[in-house]
Image (spheres, helix red, strand yellow):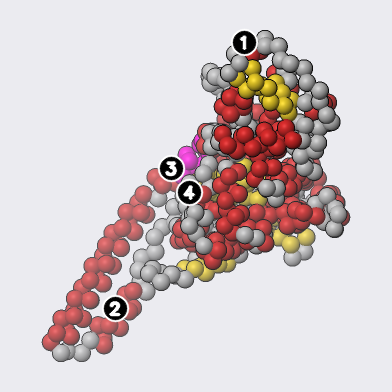
Amino acid sequence: MNELLKNAVLPQEDWQEPQPLSAKVEPEPYPIDALPDTIRAAVEEVQGFVNAPLPLVASSALGVLSLACQAHIDVKRAEKLHGPVGLFLLTIADSGERKTTCDNFFTSAIKTYQEEQAQVMQPEIKRHKAETDAWKAKCDGLLSAIKEAKKKGNPTEELETNFTQLQSEEPKSPRVPDLVIGDETPENLAWRLARQWPSAGVMSSEAGLIFGAHGMGKDSIMRNLTLLNTLWDGGEHSIGRRTSESFTVKDARLTMALQIQEATLRDFFGRSGELARGTGFLARFLVAWPEFTQGTRFFNDPPSEWPHLTAFHKHIAGILAHPVPMMDDGTLSPVMLTLSPEAKKAWIKYYDTIEMQLQSGGALYNVRDVASKSADNAARLAALFHQFEHSAGEISLEAMECASRIAAWHLNESRRFFGELSLPVELADAVSVDNWLINYCGEEQIDYVSKNHVRQYGPLRNGNRLNEAINELMELDRVQSVQKGRQQIIKINPALFEMPR
């Protein structure tokens, strides 16, 4: 904001008591101290340089942790309650919040592992190519012989039997770790898990393909969501194809660490109807909806050393160095981690605390789909924390309590987002602008800002939507609009700075 505006004397206006926008859920500070010390220090180190929202940076680290561990361990919560540790993480933020940059910081150990494994497997890859070329030549030879025999009117039964037998002898391709995946359709992702490597992580700052292309119908969306739900559960899913070979993915492990823009997610909800919530797809995600940071990320010289990030990479490399427990058919057989008696009591307490709030009128009633998966996610996080720090023995009480704090924070973020998602677009925009104005003006210790500044640095770039949001806030006595020369100034009701946030 220029100095003329800063020093401007604006007319004093009478203010009415501000009307509430909605019964919104307030954001809570990210519980950074609940992360294991090595992870926490690495997250703070990266966030200090990148200046991305802290929950986004932490989600990048947790996504890498999940991807590194998921092929090696499962977690048992109670008798007949056990399953994978892979996390689905979803950050709702505008493009440009630097998720890709954060992912690149944390994934380097995994990418190094992939490169090393590809090099080790080179002889096997070359052998497979030679065997495949020879097999194809035999197939072509038999097909030619069958055609020639038919031309001459000779019997072909023996040749056809040999050809059928040869088809079953196609050389199997070697399995080479290919863990980090960008944008990929769910069906292609499943094929990679079934045929190439049974553990993968989708790290994407534009999650459009995962949530479905714009023209995708409800039937296609339903198939995709069912598949992704099965992969989160570690179950079995068969995919039939008309034009290529059908296949089954079984006991694979998947991590997703995605970023999606709010408008894209709204569009997805509009196209899918109740499918995203009704199928339990979004319930599986640890959601983060952090404050907008663009416009406040001033230049920092990168540090000459990254001691905490280096320590994080060392831990991840150590996990990846262990042989992947894999059956002869290529399916995984992870080690089952169990909760210590104290950790199990803490997990049951967290489970029951949530359950009591699911009844009608309870704090979690409107997000009971998400809440029903929160204890499962807490157990997954606890197993991941344990594997990162110890890799042996039972999961400790400390790991369970810290994991529950992280899971509870994400549950509150789901309450925030899904509560405001149910609002009309105009009111949701007003909520977004209102939050930005109060935060920005509070930090700058001012009570007014130019409308152009709001449009340039605030959450809405569309002029018409911004006008509608401001008009909504004016009707609720939360802001006033004042013309000062050629500039339109937005004044904030002083009472809003006194309200608890």
3D distance between C-alphas at marks 3 and 4: 20 Å
Residue 449 placement (x, y as % from top left): 66, 21
Element under label 2? helix
Q: Are marks 1 and 2 in contact (CB under 8 Å)?
A: no
Q: CA distance from mark 1 to mark 2?
A: 85 Å
Q: Quadrant of the N terminus?
A: top right
The quadrant in which residue 105 appears is: top right
Counting residues from the N terminus, which is met first, the one under dot 2 or under dot 3? 3
In the rendered view, does 368 fall on the left or right side of 301? right
* Residue type highlighted by circle 3: Glu
Residue 108 magenta-highlighted = yes
| Identity, as a three-letter code, of the amino acid under mark 4 | Asp
Q: Quadrant of residue 365?
A: bottom right
Q: Mark 3 and mark 1: span between their CA atoms?
A: 56 Å
Q: Which secondary structure type mostly characterizes the magenta part of the structure?
A: helix
Residue 40 seen by the camera? no
Mark 2 is surrounded, within 10 Å at the Cα level, by few (under 14), some (14 to 19) or many (20 or more) other residues, namely: some
Report the residue at 58% width, 37% height from top.
464
Give the labeled residue for mark 2.
163
The residue labelled by disc 3 is: 115
Image coordinates of residue 27 in percent, x first then y, are 75, 37
Q: For this view, does 143 lie left or right of residue 222?
A: left
Q: Which residues are magenta?
A: 104-115
Mark 1: secondary structure: helix
Amino acid tagged 1: Leu
* Residue pictured at 79% horizontal, 28% vertical: 496
Asked whether the residues under the numbered discs 3 and 1 touch, taking CB atoms below 8 Å apart as contact, a structural biologist would say no
Judge by depth and name the residue closer to the eye, 38 or 371.
371
The residue where tag 1 is placed is 4
Q: Are marks 2 and 4 in contact (CB under 8 Å)?
A: no
* Picture coordinates of residue 293, whole percent (x, y): 62, 29
